[in-house]
Amino acid sequence: MTEEKRINIVLAGHGNTGKSAVFNYLTGLHQHIGNWAGKTIEKLEGTLYYNDHTIDVLDLPGIYSLTTYSEEELISREYIIHQQPDCVINIIDSTNLERNLIFTLQLLELECPIVLALNMMDLAKKKGITIDFKKLQDILNVPVIPTVASRGSGLTGIMDKVIGLKEEKAEPRIHPYGKEIEDCIRQLSVLLQGIDLPYPARWVAIKLLEKDKDITQRVREKKAEIPEKAKRLCEHLEEIHGHDSSLVIADERSHLAYRISRETVTLIARRKISLNDRLDAITTHRFTGYLIMIAILGGMFLTVFTFGNWLSGWFDTLFKDWHAVWNNTVGTTFFASLGWAAIESVLALVQIALPYILPFYILLYVLEGWGYMARISFLMDHFMHKMGIHGKGCISFIIGLGCNVPGCMSCRIMESKRERFITAVLVTLVPCSAVSVIVFGLVGKYVGLLWALGLYLFAMIIIFLAGKLSSKLMKGEPVELIMPMPDYRTPQVKTILYQTWDALKEFIFIAAPIVILSGVIIHAINLAGWMPAISSFLSPVTVAWLGLPAITGILLIFGILRKELILVMLAAYLGTTHFSDVLSSQQMITLAVVSMFYIPCVATISVLWKEYGWKKAMAICMLEILFALILAGLVKRLLDFVF
């Protein structure tokens, strides 16, 4: 394959436009996930081979503008400018053309080659929306392809256009703003000629008028008088229009998107209300909406519990004779025992953790693909304001139910630093899938499902009180909820399987080695006779205060690596997964409480460190250890009256 036949493209667009479906369809299994250099933001890359071309695909974060309000937006625009991809594929939600075009116009200002993918055309048709894509193509002077990414429709047409653009690039079409703005842009563009910047002069001029701090600083380093001139022009625009110049530009861009949309979109009157509208009315209603949310989330946890118990029991039957076979075949020497400890750790991981994690991730991604997540945020907005944040934080909480790591990373959707930090702290208290293993596999299975659900309710109360306290300590007001409400759509099985596999890969390739190593170390400590000394050292906390077996002290230490290790290694150490034989109901609940709150796992701590600094990360850890131990001890004493 010659170098001339390699093409580099990026996917850009709002969230919930089907960008992930396009990426998965194009790249299939030829994709990998990493992080942007020096950032905790995910970087999705993949490769496809089409018409004798090797096409490298990068999926940019879902963003709504090319400003510097968030790391995702800054990363996206810097990549497009400095890496100069052969083509930017702008994925657009056809049911909301006008809103999406605002972002498209910003891409055009960067003067990069663009192919417009009008996605979700099937949903637009159901809504009675018709888009004259040929007219839109003439107005913007870029290729426009109607697509239905969930079915792969139109995606080969995009690739054909990409290859065509590589060979013959079209000149970007300038879409002028109002007379006063264009005059200011022209004056700044003249001054910017000859300045060594990697950006188009017109785009820099617009950013200066938008008071973009990053661009203003870069220009000042080259020629200090240009930002001063821009400041005077901003004041001139503000005097004419009566509000901030950045709002003037945003308003002009929105008006331009509106005009283009008016020229290309036809709305056919519908005689009956669509199913989507009916669902929206019911699921966002102030009474039925909450009932449905409780039913959906309750059904989700009931399904996880039921399926998890069944699969766990099946594995128990499958693995019950393996230990005897190992002893008869290999023996019971020191190294043979360590070998069995490694195998037993894996079996315990498969038997205890996998049955609950697998259905949880599948159901979580079904709800996300269906479009229900945004409705939960809407319903929870008022409640979340009482915690000092707004409804979008609920998305981070739900993601945190799967894993606290992406839950903390998703806190970037919050608008202010204050809200981002408060949300991240609260996410660390959300019971992740690893904690769910303990709650369902221990309390739910042996004490009762109501007790397990009660622990989740208890966690919600703790999170709410922690939010109230955090909002009092960190002064400021939560901003109002502004977020798109995607249409309901049929979840795509292929996309859900990809997402579930990505989540399970971390479980398999990261958790398994940690579990094996930890199991071997604990078994070696036990065989060496050191366990009594370590357990005795920790017993004032574990035995005297928490009322737990002495062994749980060392398990809680290793549990910092991954929470499910507590239960997995307990099973490996005791040689049984029938925990009711060795733990009382009171001890199971107490162990679950301390596991839920005592410290984030190492991966979560590292994200907190990168996002907010080591001082805040360590402060969170110390406070949560102290809080969890005090709380679990109090819970144990309350349970004395029950059991």
Image: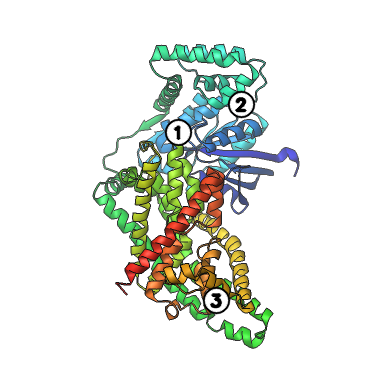
Q: Label 2 belongs to which residue? A: 170
CB within 8 Å, label 3 to label 2: no
Dot 3, how many residues are within 10 Å of its Cα: few (below 14), some (14-19), or many (20+)?
A: many
Q: Residue farthest to the left?
A: 287
CB within 8 Å, label 1 to label 3: no
Q: Which one is earlier in the sequence, the residue at label 1 or at label 2?
A: 1
Seen at 47% across and 50% down, the residue is 407
User: What is the three-letter code of the residue carrying label 3?
Assistant: Tyr
| Residue 165 placement, left or right of 562 | right
Question: Would residue 389 be seen by someone viewing this image from the given angle?
Answer: no
User: What is the three-letter code of the residue carrying label 2?
Assistant: Ala
Q: Label 3 belongs to which residue? A: 573
Residues 259 and 122: in front is 259
User: What is the three-letter code of the residue carrying label 1?
Assistant: Asn
Residue 82 at what x, y percent from top left? 65, 32
Seen at 57% across and 36% down, the residue is 75
CB within 8 Å, label 1 to label 2: no
Dot 2, how many residues are within 10 Å of its Cα: few (below 14), some (14-19), or many (20+)?
A: some
Residues 314 and 382: in front is 382
Question: Would residue 58 be seen by someone viewing this image from the given angle?
Answer: yes
Q: Label 1 belongs to which residue? A: 100
Give the foreground label among 1 and 3: 3
